[in-house]
Image (cartoon, grey):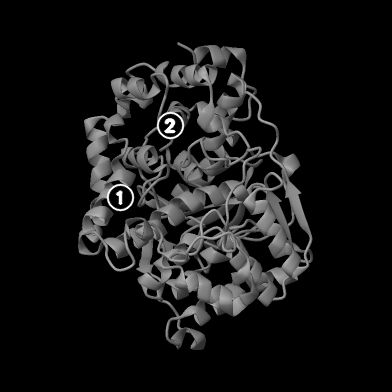
Amino acid sequence: MYFTLAVSAATGQACAALAGAAERTDPRVMPIPGPARVAWRAPDGRAVVLHWGDADNSGTSHAGTIWAEGAAVHARTGLTRVDPVYLAEVDGAVVVSDRASWAAAVTGRMGDPDPAMIGAFLSLGYPAGAATPFRGVRALGGDRALWLAGGRVAGGRLVAGRARPEDERPAGPDRVAAALTEAVRPLAEAGAPAELSLTGGKDSRLVAAALTAARVPFLARTHGFAGHPDVVIAGLIADRFGIEHTVTQPRPPGAPDEADVLRRLRAAVLVSDGMLSAFENVGWPDPRTVSTAVQAGGHGGELLRGGYAPTAWRTPAVLSAAAGAELFRRMTTRRLSLLRPGPARAYLASLTPSAAALARGPLAALDDFYLANRAGRWSAAARQAYLLRSPLSQPLFADRVVRAARAVPLRDRMSDRLHRDVLGLLCPELLAVPLAGSGWHGEPRSPATVLTTPPGPAAADWRRDYGEDVAGFLRGYVLDHDEGSRVFGIIRRNAAERLLRPPQADRHGVWALATLAALLSGDWLNAREPASQESLSRARI
């Protein structure tokens, strides 16, 4: 894994200055070892591409989203933009990067937080639209292509889809099945079996069926206690395919100490580029745990089921427009009271296009919001964190798969019809294997179709069930900042005090607020340092 930053400037001098800033970037900003190296420079000196980390190519980013061609820099995003591109403009120059904090560091935006991102982070748990933690650094939308020359964005158009013969057929499950099979087929050339994270749900079995259809060697891994539905059903699926199945059990729960919590807050910002809460299990950039095996999974399966739309679909035939509006309001404004008036207005303004789309058609708007934001922002940030540990294959995010799925009527997706039909085409015998937890939409629940969690041991989740020691630390970590801090320049202190007051009923909100304190205060830059007693004492009140 490596990161890429490219500069296009009006003059060679301006380009050299920004390239120099990229090479001098504080290594604490980046989740992997550097330094930055120039990979390509235009003959006229007005464009440059740099890599941070080990890269064996010249001038192309890890995901192929940024590259040099001729004397210009090019960038593009896929439909889901799970491999993100960030853009920052300064006088006479444009910077693009696949890491927002690197673009912010190079253009001097590290200390200028974007209130629109803060509002989304608190309410949704991830950024929305184009906002990043840094004002002036924005995420490109999905399916975009840019051509940068002479310090200007010379192109900025929607990518025109090039029709293939198979794409000209009527939309249906056969196109989705074919696209999914083609998305995993390159894994057959990896030289080692792919490692599929297999559960008892709908999505990982669909990927297992595609791997089988494409004749890709793979083995399965499941995390959970013996007897848990995910473990039992994954074992049944592995037996059907005759593949190796490894089960790893959760570690016994242990009470976290303050150093654990502080490390988690800092690391969450570092590995997710400041875009995911420490409630999420995004891991830690430890070179000793890096794997070379491709990790495959069913991430993105909700795109085949209409994203957020099914939540507002109360019956198979009736949608309440009010239900769609209420769902959108709950998702996007649930913690709006934490923001000061100015930041709150900026955040609400950023939601205007989505709110207008909701008024035109609730189901389609909720489907689109999931694609653009839950997939395009949450999954993009999580994917960047996961890629620090191993190569990934997430075929349900592949452009051709998503395009084919979205060409199917939304009602067929929300009803699970598309999902079941695709599975039936790729591996019909898996339709008879029970699901864990919840069944197919509209199908009666029975032991033959749904396996529920039996009584027995369960992995304790200290993120939700932490005690007073952790609650006190999180309270002190946030409230130790004074009124003149960046934290309380955006957050209303009295609202934060209410959220952090015992018993801290809104644990998701507490984690989000504490993560923002790590981000806005700059404490995340200490992610690789041991949590010293001095830093812990400063976090107390």
Q: Amino acid at mark 2?
A: Leu
Q: Nearer the viewer, mark 2 or mark 1?
A: 1
Q: Nearer the viewer, residue 282 or 349?
A: 282
Asked which secondary structure carries label 1, the reply is helix
Q: Residues within 10 Å of mark 2 (few under 14, many from 20)?
A: many
Residue at horizontal 59 percent and vertical 28 percent from the top = 263
Q: Nearer the viewer, residue 178 or 400?
A: 178
Q: Nearer the viewer, residue 164 or 224?
A: 224
Asked which secondary structure carries label 2, the reply is helix
Rendering coords of residue 188 (x, y %): 73, 71
**Image quarter of residue 39:** bottom right
Relative side of 219 to 199, left or right = right
Name the residue carrying label 2.
516
Q: Nearer the viewer, residue 225 or 9?
A: 225
**Image quarter of residue 23:** top right
Residue at horizontal 38 percent and vertical 19 percent from the top = 501
Q: Amino acid at mark 1?
A: Leu
Give the answer, above or below, for where 522 lies relative to 79.
above
Give the answer, above or below, for where 164 lies relative to 52.
below
Rendering coords of residue 532 (x, y %): 62, 17
The circle on residue 327 is 1
Q: Residues within 10 Å of mark 1 (few under 14, many from 20)?
A: some
Rendering coords of residue 137 (x, y %): 39, 46
The circle on residue 272 is none
Q: Is residue 390 visible?
A: no
Give the answer, above or below, for where 209 lies relative to 114.
below
Residue at horizontal 38 percent and vertical 43 percent from the top = 124
Rendering coords of residue 217 (x, y %): 75, 69
Q: Quadrant of the C terminus?
A: top left
Of callouts 2 and 1, the N-terminal one: 1
Q: Label 1 near label 2: C-beta < 8 Å? A: no
CA distance separating discs 2 and 1: 25 Å
